[in-house]
Image: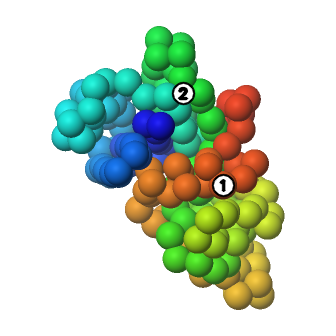
Amino acid sequence: MITLALDTSTPYLTLALRWPGGELESTERIERAHAERLPGSVQALFAEAGLDFRAERLVIGSGPGSYTGVRIGASYALALARVWQAELLGVPTLCALLSRQPGLQAPALDARKENVYGALYRVEESTVTELSPPEKYTQADFAALAQDRGAELRQDAVPSGLSLIHAAGTLAQGQPQLRLSYL
C-alpha cells in the first residue's frame, strides 16, 4: 500500500511516502508558503520515489496549527483522497514531532504568550499510545509534567512525515473522521 503523509500546520512543509520496499520524506521550513509549494512538492516526492502520482492512504497532520496552514493541508488531502478514492486519516500534528526512539515523549508546539500545545505519548517499535490528549499548557507546567513523568520533552522539534505515518498505522491515532485543531 502506498501512503502519503502531509502536514502544513507548522512553519514546515512536512511530506512522506511509504510504499512496499521503501520510504521517503521531505521537511522544509517555508514559513507561510504552503499553498504555493504543497502541490509541486508532493508531485516531486512521488517523482523522486519513482512512483505514479497515486496513493491508497493519506495521513494528514490535523493540527494544532495556524488556521490557514491547517486548512491548506486538509483541503489538499481531502481533494486527493476523493480523486484517488483513498483512505484519509487525521493524526495530531504533535505526532509528527515524535522521534522513532522508544520511550515516553512529550511533544509541544509554541502556542504564544509563554504557552505550548502539548501531549504525552509512549512510543514503541510497533505502537504509539496517547497517554494524555493534546491541550494547552503554560511552558513551565508542561515542562514540569514531562519531567514528572520521565518523558523526553520535544518542544518545537522538526516534524517528520514518517512519524505521522507510524502514529496513524499503530493505534486509534489515525481517525477516519478528520478533526482539525487550531492554535
Q: Which amino acid type is marked by label 1?
A: Thr
Mark 2 falls on what kind of element? Answer: helix
Q: Give how far apart the Cα atoms at labels 1 and 2 are.
A: 21 Å
Q: Quadrant of residue 124?
A: bottom right
* Neighbour tally class for label 2: few under 14, some 14-19, many 20 plus, Cα within 10 Å: many
Residues packed near mark 1 inside 10 Å, few (<14), some (14 to 19) or many (20 plus): some
Q: Measuring 21% from the left and 36% from the top, which residue is drawn there?
A: 50
Numbered disc 1: secondary structure: helix
* Amino acid type of the residue that numbered disc 2 sits on in the rendered structure: Ala
Relative side of 25 to 125, left or right:
left
Q: Which residue is mark 1?
A: 170
Q: Nearer the viewer, residue 133 or 171?
A: 171
What residue would you read off at disc 2?
A: 74
Look at 62% across and 65% down and name the residue there. Answer: 126
Residue 58: horizontal and vertical position, in percent? 51, 33
Q: Which residue is located at x 75 percent, y 48 percent?
A: 172
Q: Residue furthest front?
A: 21
The residue located at (43%, 36%) in the rendering is 2
- Dot placed on the residue nearer the N-terminal end, 1 or 2: 2
